[in-house]
Image (cartoon, rainbow, N blue to C red):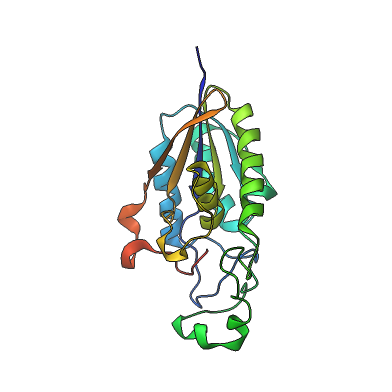
Amino acid sequence: MSTTTVVHLLRHGEVHNPDGILYGRLPEFHLSDNGSRMADLAAGWFAGRDVAALYSSPLDRAEETARPLADEFGVAVRMDERLIEAGNTFQGMSLSRRSVRDPRVLRRVYNPFRPSWGEPYARIVARMIDVIKVVRKEAWGREAVCVSHQLPIWMARRAAEKKRLWHRPDRRQCNLASVTSLTFEDQKLVSVGYAEPAADLYRNGGGPLVPGA
């Protein structure tokens, strides 16, 4: 008989970011009050599941999203750099629709397929696959949660579904505190699921406050 293992990829909750900065990997960007409620709702969504392992990106917003799950299941949060946000040359900038005419932006967006403005999609997929394999082995026959960020989770999903990696950022199905679930029979991926435990707390349609965040 085959063994079923589920690896859940949980995106962090809403971040306190009143200046609309693309915070990327910058430190000291914490969950907002609304984001903390999202994390609690996500932990509630997992209640009753057989979660054996909990991993997180080392960034503040991800670690804070993981804490309610650690309390729920009595497991330690393990930090893993492979779950970190994608590198982005726009980090620290405040972008808007007008930014497409900014020379500082234009000179970085010459190749949407790699992409030219940040960490290559293929590299993101490689590190996410690495950590998923490790987590799947640890949680063998049970479930695990990895708290990460929109783009890394979306890349892992597109790779799992054998879709091309380049895409329109505004069409990612990976909302705040959402759960992308990878179900394996032994080492074979058999299904990809998606849920939004915190949907009731989304504002303005629930899109990311900053694209790629």
From the viewer's perspective, tell me whether residue 81 is left or right of residue 61.
Answer: right
Which residue corresponds to the image point at 54% horizontal and 51% vertical from the top-left? 155
Image coords of residue 117 (percent x, y): 62, 71
Along the line of sight, the residue nearer the viewer: 56 or 82: 82
Which residue corresponds to the image point at 65% horizontal and 60% vertical from the top-left? 120
From the viewer's perspective, tell me whether residue 133 is left or right of residue 101.
Answer: right
- Image height check: is 97 above or below 166? below
Q: Residue furthest right?
A: 81
Q: What is the number of callouts on the image?
A: 0
Along the line of sight, the residue nearer the viewer: 38 or 89: 89
Which residue corresponds to the image point at 50% horizontal and 75% vertical from the top-left? 20
Image coords of residue 72 (percent x, y): 48, 36
Image coords of residue 181 (percent x, y): 46, 39
From the viewer's perspective, tell me whether residue 159 is left or right of residue 88.
Answer: left
Image coords of residue 73 (percent x, y): 51, 32
- Image height check: is 154 above or below 29? above
- Image height check: is 7 above or below 62? above
From the viewer's perspective, tell me whether residue 72 is left or right of residue 134.
Answer: left
Which residue corresponds to the image point at 64% horizontal and 63% vertical from the top-left? 25
